[in-house]
Amino acid sequence: MNRIRSLSMVLCSLLFLPLRGDTGEPAPVSAALRGVWENENRFVEFTENNMRIVLKPYYRFVYESFPPLSCFSNPRSQRVAADNIHSLSLRYPRDKKVYPFTAARIGDALFLDFMVRLSIPDADPVARAELTESAGNAAAEAQSAAGTEPAGGLDGVWLPAGAVPALRLYPVEPAKDFYMMVFDGSRYFRIRYWKTDARERDVDGRFIGKDGKEYRLPKFFRMDGALYTCITATGKIIRNFEEGRIRVEDGTLRFEPERVVYAGTEAAYRQPVPYTLDGDVLAFGEPYLVRSVVTDLDAAIAEHNAKRRPPRKPIFDFLDLDFHWDEVARLRGDILDR
């Protein structure tokens, strides 16, 4: 009996261990991320077990390095199957809490603002077929007549995979809400999820589009350690969702909402949105980081900081003024004679 009890305690403890390698250490950062990345205001260097941030303050006149942060990989979510998605966690000095974040690598670009096509194995097979196969020739023909490309490659349920907007020297709390997208041919739906402390349950929420078609989504979703929901209390009907048409024009997405535009998001539809589609990864806008040509970051910092700062541009341009000194002398004489 004692042996069985001891074995049960060991098995239970193993369920709560983080992802670790064969040596018992936290899983290392993927080799695909290791190296130096940069944007206009910082370098980010990933090594096997660390992440270092180097800022470019003072108009890039100085590169300011900071101590590395402990960084390790997390287990892959069962609902996110894309190989170029990397789930990581950071530990900050004097902070016992672990801060997870997710990044997508597409070529030599690293995105934090991106979505992944969601795999819902428990979804209704009929609903899944409608999402993946019913883009329809009618939608393609309608867009062809309008001079736009069909958006069939976007069909499916898309989840924002990362809740952290940037990599900073201090902890960044997860977003309070996010929007899940559903693309079906030339139509799109946007559903808001918000943080909750409710008890997580494996149930679906559902809504019906303008054309009478029913869609199902997870009522609860856990992202970067936080729990989100799209329905209050014990309901299963998603009542507030945004619906409209979507067009692909010259490598951009143009949203045309027909009902319920969420407050504060109207600006997203005034101009076409650039996007990058790589299999089951959809990224919006410019990448957060790009692969740097720098390979030795310490040497690059030393070389850059050894340069002399160029002189500051004067506030006023040089003016070649021609004074009438004889007139000045006359005026001075008149003043002194008084």
Image: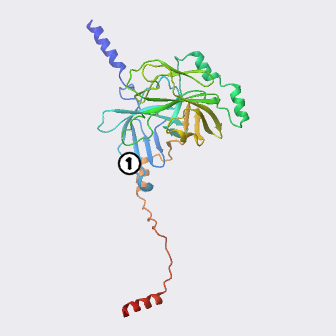
The amino acid beneath tag 1 is Ser
User: Hey, which residue is sitting farthest bottom in the picture?
Assistant: 337
Question: Would you place residue 83 above or below residue 249 in this image?
Answer: above
- Return the x and y of residue 284 as percentages of the image width and height: 55, 38
Residue at x 31%, y 16% (from the top left corner): 10
Colour pattern of the rendering = rainbow
| Residue 114 position in % (x across, y down) | 52, 35
Residue 160 left/right relative to 225:
right
Q: Residue furthest top?
A: 1
Which of 150/313 is in front? 150
Q: Nearer the viewer, residue 31 or 309?
A: 309
Q: Is residue 106 above or below residue 230?
A: below
The answer to whether 26 appears left or right of 38 in the picture is left
| Whether residue 259 is visible | yes
Can residue 160 be seen at all in this image of the molecule?
A: no
Percent x, y for residue 136? 68, 24
Describe residue 277's horizontal placement relative to residue 65 as left or right: right
Compared with 232, 295 (above or below) is below
Mark 1, Cα crowd under 10 Å, few <14 / some 14-19 / many 20+, is: some
- Tell me the quarter of the image containing the C terminus: bottom left
Identify the image quadrant of the N terminus. Answer: top left
Q: Residue at x 69, y 33 (%)?
A: 143
The image shows residue 91 at horizontal and vertical percentages of 35, 35
**Marker count (numbered):** 1
Q: Which residue is mark 1?
A: 65
Tell me the element at label 1. strand
Q: Residue furthest left?
A: 2
